[in-house]
Image (cartoon, grey):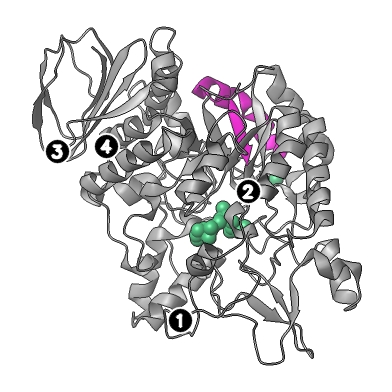
Amino acid sequence: MEKNWWKGKVAYQIYPKSFKDSNDDGIGDLKGITEKLDYLKDLGVDIVWLSPMFKSPFVDQGYDISDYYAVDPIFGTDQDMDELIAEAKKRDMYIVLDLVVNHCSDQHEWFQKALESPDSEYRDYFYFVDSPDGPPSNWRSYFGGNMWEKLPGTDTYYFHSFHKTQPDLNWQNPLVRRKIYDMMNWWFEKGVAGFRIDAIINIKKDLNWTNYKTDNKDGLVTPEVFLENAQPIEPFLREMYEETFKKYNAFAVGEVFNESDEDLQFLIGGEDSVFSSIFDFKQSTINLEDGWHNFTTPTSEQIKESIFAAHKRNDPVGVISTIIENHDQPRGVSRYIPEADLNDTSKKAFATVFMLRKGIPFIYQGQEIGMENQVFGSLEEIDDISTLNEYEVAIKDGYSPVSAFNAVTKISRDNARTPVQWDDSLYFGFSETTRPWMFSQQPNRSITVAAQLDDEASVLNYYKRLTRLYKNPVYGKTIQLGEFNPLFEEMEGVIAYERTLDKNVAVITNFQNSEVGLELAKPIVEILLNNYDEEGELDQKIALKPYQSIVLAY
Ligand code: TEU
Ligand code: CA
């Protein structure tokens, strides 16, 4: 297989629990994914990333793995997995798994054995620290509370960056690393094409367990502070690369936050970078600095700034993967498009901006039909531990229960975790007669795959046009690999850029609810895409309608 085979591919993220239920138990499964491979192929998808489908108690919806070698029975059997990999291969598609190795579940055999005795050899697989004077450090877990959990009846604490049922693995221990690499290679031998690497920045620790100055009333401090003072992770990731990815010519996309310029180099720079790509999360952090409850809709200028800044920083180094949303975020169309402007035209405009950037575009399930945020009735309908924590944060910040609920459900991860709406039957054709494991009263029942498949003007068919353009025989190379340069940067409401290689392609979007006029520097050769149904030629002077997106060669 060609090195860097993944360049120029389109990727799609599946959240297995909510994609398609094949046996009507209300839970999505592997057979359901296999059933829909043709649908994905037709959408233009090459790489399919599965959020964890491993054995798990599902406290954090599968990001708490209790057996890395087994498919959880709710998703089917190991044979179903083999079948999925084989069926994907038949269609020239690639299966990418989720590598969650910063931590495992407290139900994992390693942790269970570590708990048996202080002398257990498995103690050293994790971070256990004796500390009679309270927690060894004051770092705040991503899901709230201290990162240290006390073992009942002892002075011993164990470390968890995320939930207390997700103990961190000790990356300092070579045996742990060996077991992780062996497991990865086992999956490669089965035919998976790569991994998305979860929370990988967190494997580095400040092993002095320093107490930092608190930033809140809880006496704790944000993880960002200690991460700055933590051990370098390059040696570990370099080793992982040599022992796994490199041998299998794999696609590896890192979930990386807050990386320094230095880190960026070894992460994605050069032929022997430890990862193929990392996600660009820049726009997903806008207006969240002060907690979920203080979020306000980003302006077009903020979105533009974040996109341009991401390319300016990353493009000279390596390949980013671009997203609109994922399983940790609300639906992108609801988050970034002002509520009053949310319609098919603005959804298509937003899709254009993101799909034609330089990098590997990832589509999250349901995004291609323009699925919107959910309407949650009460806190009981929320499953996500992160949302429940952010609710508490809002309450502590003085919010009333109602306003805290309304605020955090706008950002809740559960917005993107409801079933894909395949058709307009009671359970959306996701399941037949069994109520899906997560189900809320949708404001948008009519947004379904079935309705959009035959509608030329649908968001779904627009996404297909985007992926076709991305692979267009004449312009594809330029869009996949060409340079990214901002256009009309100063023009408020306009998000536009040029992609240049052997061709020049301009991607121009009027991201606002009013018309705007602009003039191109060169004559137009060809209009490649337009989210308005318009006849006729365009000249160098263009009047763009509200949320109009045009892609042209010039
Ligand atoms: O997310 C890592 C991450 O940093 C999270 O804190 C993220 O910011 C959070 O989801 C916001 O609420 C990964 C996975 O994508 C996520 O689903 C897991 O919960 C987390 O790791 C722990 O495995
Ligand atoms: Ca099922």
- Between circles 3 and 4, the one closer to the viewer is 3
Judge whether residue 112 can be spotted in this image.
no
Label 1 crowd bin: few (<14), some (14–19), many (20+), radius 10 Å: some
- Between circles 4 and 2, the one closer to the viewer is 2
Indicate the amino acid at tag 1.
Thr
Quarter placement of the C terminus: top left
Q: Which residues are magenta?
A: 29-50
Q: Secondary structure at mark 3?
A: loop
Q: Quadrant of ligand 1?
A: bottom right
Please report the residue visible at 11 percent of the width from the left and 12 percent of the height from the top.
Answer: 539
> Is residue 186 covered in magenta?
no
Q: Secondary structure at mark 1?
A: loop
Marks 4 and 1 sit apart, C-alpha to C-alpha, by 42 Å
Marks 1 and 3 sit apart, C-alpha to C-alpha, by 40 Å
Q: Of the residues under marks 3 and 4, which one precedes in the sequence? A: 4
Marks 2 and 1 sit apart, C-alpha to C-alpha, by 29 Å
Q: In this image, 81 relative to 238: left or right? A: right
- Between circles 2 and 3, the one closer to the viewer is 2
Per the image, the residue denoted by label 4 is: 346
Q: Of the residues under marks 4 and 1, which one precedes in the sequence? A: 1
Counting from the top left corner in percent of width and height, residue 444 is at 38, 46
Q: Of the residues under marks 2 and 3, which one precedes in the sequence? A: 2
Q: Are marks 4 and 2 in contact (CB under 8 Å)?
A: no
Per the image, the residue denoted by label 2 is: 234
- Between circles 2 and 1, the one closer to the viewer is 2
Indicate the amino acid at tag 4.
Ser
Quarter placement of the N terminus: top right
Q: Secondary structure at mark 4?
A: helix
Indicate the amino acid at tag 3.
Glu
